[in-house]
């Protein structure tokens, strides 16, 4: 194995704070890390890049004491270490902020920040000092949150910032941020980056793990790329082009992504006069969204854009029958209907693929086959089981069509990667032959290769007459695939327009300031 | 060959079957005639027959319990329902002009079963409609049910004299005890009902991920009602067999702890209390393990009082063996053996 | 940048109403408040219906008669807060009474017997805790096994009851502490209240206590935060074991004997008290004082049924069942509104 050349260390801190040398970790049947060398320097933001299955999360778990390496060495602050637990790693000065905000909703904000290190007076916890100290940390982050309020009463975005507050309070030498921005809006991301830069200037080494290339290029000083458990390269951010980086990550040409845009342009089937497949008028739900009008034609792809919490998922759930609407009417091909349950929606050939695939999507202990036929079987009822031969046919055909790996219908879905789990989920909805398919964040947390496949699939489904609602936080995706785009903000619809030469800047402007009352190319 | 062995060892049934084998061994050593089956008056007798017959009520309850546990639930009220079923049947027989009339017996049994149906529906309602946690929902009936059974018997132990009724508990048909037929019948119904229809997979899906199942259009509510009703029906059948056997309804003591034995049988059989994938065959094996254990205690001459301690030990052993911690330790051990033998981990 | 929307400033009364409403609808305080109100209502109803009900001694007797259950409920609260459950408490109470009675009978002085038993039951709890955490056996099953074991050991000690005749023990058990005005309590009440105080302090003022709540809020998260989850989970079962042993001793103060069939179903009483007292079975929310309140509610219902005289005691079980139902329904409603 040839020694990969690595860029120079930063002048201010020439010695890495943490260095992993030739580390390998194996699990039954798979080598998750294969002689990987990785290092972080104090006062740098370092991004770890790689697709699903590249070994990113395994490497992070090795750094934080969740896994032990089988071979190789870890050197922290000049001394060899072997962390046997997360507590040990934390003790040493490595803090992690997780994507799922691993805090405790039933305890107060102050307690969450200081749990395990509460100030004590004469053996008992000093709540006053706790309040004061957490107030200081919150102020550093500019968070106007009552330290005594219950954590669970705050939004996910706030909870995540509190998670970072906790890490700051621990005075970490290494701060690992695992997909920290997936639940934050643009303002919050900017604020987070400001905090990250401050911490960096204070000498903290920060590991920034994210799928958002733009953000990585904005904040990271150094990048390490992994692929298939091996180190592909370490680079200083300014020295590698985006296209080079993506090529290193997926190891293949990605010209295919440009083709997609062409196809969408060529294929606008919807005409304003035809009866839309689905028309929602004034649909809303208390505490969720207020009075939204949406229409979708047959064979049309409608993209929903907006910030997290803007109501895009909430509207989609109403249209898919997952939540029940309090107000408004729904029509399918002109006939009024009420969608009370997902069953109702499915019987009307409307399928909704949840953004939360693990909690609401896959049934993880069942096989790929069972997961794929689940909705179809539920539709047939208890006493008409799908014959085994047909089950196998269905499973096999979707495994092939969607390139599900491993290509084994008896594989337990829990053991599949996130991307393949998403494909199994897609297979389930495709199997019921819906006329309207609602895809909520179908490419979140998925590698570029699988993303492209799913995007191509959406296009070909629309070409064959299926109506698709496509929701994604990535505006490029929405722009690339949609015939029409609905923009949501603060739980209401603010724009609804044809995708004629729209750019990301247009969309951002609409999301930030657009209003349904303004005539911004709106087609009612 | 080693692949087949590996599959057998890793099958969920392995350890329960091993336990059963060990218990059989102990019995045979202490009592060489353990495996013998004799025919007297055209009826089969023997230790094995006794195990099957005495364990039948608990096995039946355990079969019903399996499906409830598969939906991530639990039914603590089965003992109370069994008591109520026995008490109702006995009261009806006592109140009738001719307790030995087959028609009356049929009415008594039918009434008991119908009441169990209602009680199962009540449990299903609390769990599926009101959304109460199953352990608590059924705890309510468990607490109130025994009280209700006592009210039905007015605090007395009711004794009846009814030959057709006694057949349930002590009778033979074609030489085989009726109780065994009932157990086999309930098992077959459960298997056919769940594996020949889509019910089995749907029940497992609901147990593993209720929300995902809901979004896939699975009607969980109906399923939940079904499993709790089935569990109550099984409890009623078990209670009727027990009552018919003793020809007495003792609302306080009949089927005492049967819910615990049933849950133990299910757990020993490999179905996880967390719900999801279940095994009816496993439950049958588990019930056999428990009943054989009770028999072993008698055979070996240990005072029956100790049965409880033994059950505790057995349960603990099974749980420790089935525990993921033990499995990981064993897996690591096997891996180390393989490494030492010079083979390396497969690299993909 | 934080997405909090500021509503127009409310008036004083509006704020008070709002705070009351949010207290009643929070999963943390709601059920306990309802229990408190229920207790007051039942007490007043009893007083109206039965003469002599309002006597101070009636309330004190609630404590005297249920001191053991209070201690049990305290131990159970710890376990349920972590999302677990302990089905063995009744059996351990019985075992504790058997051990007390038989050791005293053999002439071991009470001063030694009492600590020995408490240590023994704590060790049993510790073993259960190890089974739950390190072997990942579900609490239901692990404590079920412990229940079988304890009950079985009772029978091993003796199949019939053993009476206690040790003088110092009896002196401790029956002596009453006068409180003035003709009212008095027993030492068991004092012990129970001390345990409650220690429990409250532990849960709210020590890291161990906060970790207990943390585990209930999210065990995985607590682990990632570096909290000593393993140690704490094992210790809560040890605490429950300690409380069960102590409760058994208090119970033997009451009965002055050891009996293997005693306390069957007591675990259900303890669980009912904890649930009625506002602790969520899923864990994370609840107070020890709430559980004490739950015990008092159960006690007062029993008292009323005794006062009533005409209802057979089987109705107690049915009432408790109905109460449980009502409180679970309430917990259901409150937690549903939160999500």
Image: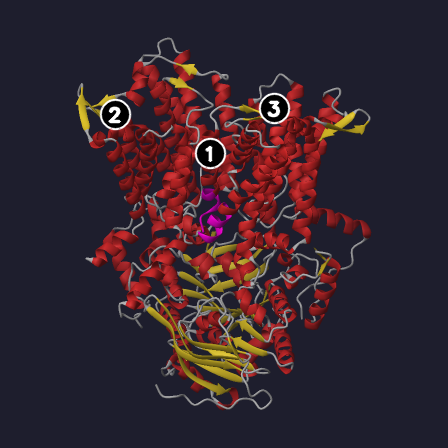
C72 lies left or right of A432: right
Q: Position of residue B9 (x, y in %)?
A: 28, 52
User: Does the stretch in magenta take in C131?
Assistant: yes
Which chain letter matches label 3? C
| Marks 1 and 2, how far apart at CA | 35 Å
| Marks 3 and 1, how far apart at CA | 22 Å
A88 lies left or right of B77: right
Q: Nearer the viewer, mark 3 or mark 2?
A: 3
Dot 1, how many residues are within 10 Å of its Cα: few (below 14), some (14-19), or many (20+)? many
> With respect to residue C201, does A18 lie above or below?
below
Q: Is residue A431 in sight in this rendering?
A: no
The residue lying toward the viewer, choosing from B341 and A222, is: B341
Q: Position of residue B235 (x, y in %)?
A: 39, 30
The part of the chain drawn in magenta is C128-142
Count of numbered labels shown in the rendering? 3
Q: Position of residue C330 (x, y in %)?
A: 61, 41
> With respect to residue C338, does A353 lie above or below?
below
């Amino acid at each position: 194995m040839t020694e990969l050349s690595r860029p120079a260390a930063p002048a201010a801190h020439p010695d890495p704070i943490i260095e992993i040398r030739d580390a390998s970790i194996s699990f039954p049947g798979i080598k998750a890390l294969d002689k990987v060398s990785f290092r972080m320097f104090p006062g740098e933001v370092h991004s770890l890049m790689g697709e699903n299955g590249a070994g990113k999360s395994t490497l992070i778990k090795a750094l934080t004491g969740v896994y032990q390496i089988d071979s190789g060495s870890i050197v922290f602050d000049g001394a060899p270490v072997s962390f046997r637990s997360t507590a040990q790693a934390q003790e040493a000065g490595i803090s992690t902020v997780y994507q799922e905000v691993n805090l405790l909703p039933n305890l107060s904000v102050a307690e969450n920040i200081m749990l395990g290190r509460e100030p004590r007076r004469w053996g008992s916890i000093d709540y006053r000092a706790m309040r004061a100290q957490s107030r200081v940390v919150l102020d550093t982050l500019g968070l106007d949150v009552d330290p005594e309020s219950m954590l669970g009463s705050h939004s996910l975005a706030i909870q995540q910032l509190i998670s970072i507050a906790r890490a700051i309070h621990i005075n970490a030498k290494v701060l690992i941020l695992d997909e920290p921005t997936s639940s934050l809006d643009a303002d919050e991301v900017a604020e987070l980056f400001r905090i990250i830069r401050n911490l960096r200037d204070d000498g903290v080494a920060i590991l920034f793990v994210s799928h958002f290339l733009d953000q990585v290029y904005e904040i990271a000083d150094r990048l390490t790329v992994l692929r298939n458990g091996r180190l592909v390269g370490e680079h200083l951010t300014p020295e590698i082009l985006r296209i080079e980086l993506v090529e290193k990550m997926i190891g293949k040409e990605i010209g295919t992504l440009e083709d997609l845009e062409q196809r969408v342009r060529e294929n606008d089937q919807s005409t304003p006069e035809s009866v839309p497949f689905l028309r929602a008028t004034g649909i809303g739900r208390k505490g969720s969204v207020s009075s939204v009008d949406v229409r979708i034609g047959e064979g049309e792809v409608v993209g929903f854009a907006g910030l997290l919490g803007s109501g895009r998922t909430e509207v989609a759930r109403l249209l898919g029958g997952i939540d029940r609407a309090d107000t408004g009417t729904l029509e399918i091909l002109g006939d009024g209907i009420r969608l009370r349950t997902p069953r109702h929606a499915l019987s009307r050939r409307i399928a909704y693929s949840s953004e939360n695939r693990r909690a609401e999507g896959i049934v993880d202990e069942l096989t790929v086959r069972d997961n794929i036929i689940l909705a179809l079987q539920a539709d047939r009822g208890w006493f008409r089981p799908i014959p085994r031969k047909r089950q196998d046919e269905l499973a096999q055909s979707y495994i092939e069509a969607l390139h599900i790996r491993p290509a084994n219908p008896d594989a337990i879905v829990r053991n599949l990667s996130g991307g393949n789990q998403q494909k199994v989920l897609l297979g389930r909805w495709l199997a019921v032959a819906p006329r309207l398919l609602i895809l909520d964040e179908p490419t979140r947390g998925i590698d570029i290769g699988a993303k492209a496949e799913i995007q191509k699939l959406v296009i070909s489904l629309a070409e064959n007459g299926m109506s698709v609602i496509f929701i994604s936080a990535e505006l490029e995706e929405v722009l690339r695939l949609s015939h029409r785009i609905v923009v949501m903000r603060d739980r209401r619809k603010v724009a609804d327009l044809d995708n004629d030469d729209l750019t990301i800047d247009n969309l951002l402007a609409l999301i930030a300031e657009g209003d349904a009352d303004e005539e911004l190319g709106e087609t009612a | 060959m080693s692949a087949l062995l590996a599959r057998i060892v890793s099958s969920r049934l392995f350890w329960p079957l091993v336990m059963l084998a060990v218990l059989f061994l102990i019995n045979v050593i202490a009592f060489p005639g353990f495996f013998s089956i004799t025919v007297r008056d055209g009826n089969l007798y023997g230790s094995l027959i006794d195990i099957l017959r005495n364990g039948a009520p608990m096995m039946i309850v355990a079969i019903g319990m399996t499906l409830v546990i598969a939906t991530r639930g639990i039914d603590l009220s089965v003992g109370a329902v069994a008591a109520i079923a026995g008490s109702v049947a006995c009261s009806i027989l006592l109140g009738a002009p001719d307790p030995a009339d087959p028609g009356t017996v049929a009415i008594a049994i039918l009434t008991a079963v119908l009441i169990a149906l209602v009680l199962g529906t009540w449990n299903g309602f609390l769990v599926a409609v009101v959304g109460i946690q199953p352990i608590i929902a059924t705890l309510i009936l468990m607490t109130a049910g025994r009280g209700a059974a006592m009210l039905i018997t007015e605090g007395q132990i009711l004794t009846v004299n009814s030959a057709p009724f006694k057949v349930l508990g002590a009778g033979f048909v074609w030489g085989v005890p009726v109780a065994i037929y009932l157990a086999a019948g309930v098992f077959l119904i459960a298997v056919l009902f769940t594996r020949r229809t889509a019910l089995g997979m749907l029940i497992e899906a609901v147990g593993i991920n209720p929300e995902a199942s809901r979004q896939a259009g699975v009607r969980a509510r109906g399923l939940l009602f079904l499993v709790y009703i089935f569990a109550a029906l099984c409890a009623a059948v078990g209670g009727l067999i027990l009552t018919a056997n003793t020809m007495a309804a003792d609302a306080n003591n009949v089927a005492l702890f049967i819910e615990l034995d049933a849950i133990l049988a299910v757990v020993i059989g490999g179905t996880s209390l967390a719900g999801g994938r279940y095994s009816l065959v496993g439950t049958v094996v588990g019930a056999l393990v428990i009943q054989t254990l009770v028999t072993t205690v008698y055979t070996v001459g240990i005072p029956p009082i100790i049965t409880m301690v033994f059950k505790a030990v057995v349960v603990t052993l099974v749980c420790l063996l089935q525990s993921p911690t033990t499995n990981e330790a064993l897996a690591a051990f096997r891996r180390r053996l393989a490494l030492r033998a010079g083979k390396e981990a497969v690299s993909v | 940048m934080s997405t909090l929307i500021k509503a127009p400033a409310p008036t004083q009364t509006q704020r008070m109403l709002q705070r009351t409403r949010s207290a009643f609808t929070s999963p943390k305080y709601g059920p306990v408040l309802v229990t408190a109100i229920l207790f007051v209502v039942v007490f007043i109803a009893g007083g109206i219906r039965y003469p002599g009900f309002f006597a101070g001694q009636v309330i004190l007797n609630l404590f005297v008669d249920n001191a053991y259950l209070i201690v049990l409920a305290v131990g159970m609260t710890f376990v349920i807060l972590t999302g677990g459950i302990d089905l063995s408490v009744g059996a351990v109470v019985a075992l504790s009474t058997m051990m007390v009675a038989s050791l005293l009978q053999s002439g071991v002085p009470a001063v030694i017997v009492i600590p020995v038993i408490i240590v023994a039951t704590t060790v049993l709890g510790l073993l259960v805790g190890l089974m739950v955490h390190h072997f990942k056996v579900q609490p239901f099953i692990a404590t079920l096994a412990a229940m079988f074991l304890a009950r079985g050991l009772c029978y091993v000690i003796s199949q019939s009851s053993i009476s206690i005749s040790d003088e110092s023990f009896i002196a401790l058990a029956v002596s009453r502490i006068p409180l003035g005005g003709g009212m008095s309590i027993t030492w068991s009440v004092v012990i129970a209240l001390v345990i409650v105080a220690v429990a409250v302090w532990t849960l709210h003022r020590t890291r161990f206590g906060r970790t207990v709540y943390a585990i209930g809020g999210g065990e995985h998260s607590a682990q990632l935060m570096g909290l000593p989850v393993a140690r704490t989970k094992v210790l809560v079962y040890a605490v429950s074991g300690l409380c069960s042993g102590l409760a058994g001793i208090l119970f033997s103060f009451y009965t002055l004997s050891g009996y293997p069939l005693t306390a069957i179903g007591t675990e259900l009483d303890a669980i009912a008290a904890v649930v009625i007292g506002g602790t969520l079975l899923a864990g994370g929310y609840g107070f020890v004082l709430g559980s004490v309140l739950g015990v008092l509610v159960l006690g007062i219902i029993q008292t009323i049924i005794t006062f009533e005289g005409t209802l057979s005691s089987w109705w107690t079980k049915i009432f408790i069942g109905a109460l449980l139902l009502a409180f679970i329904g309430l917990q259901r409603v409150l937690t549903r509104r939160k999500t």
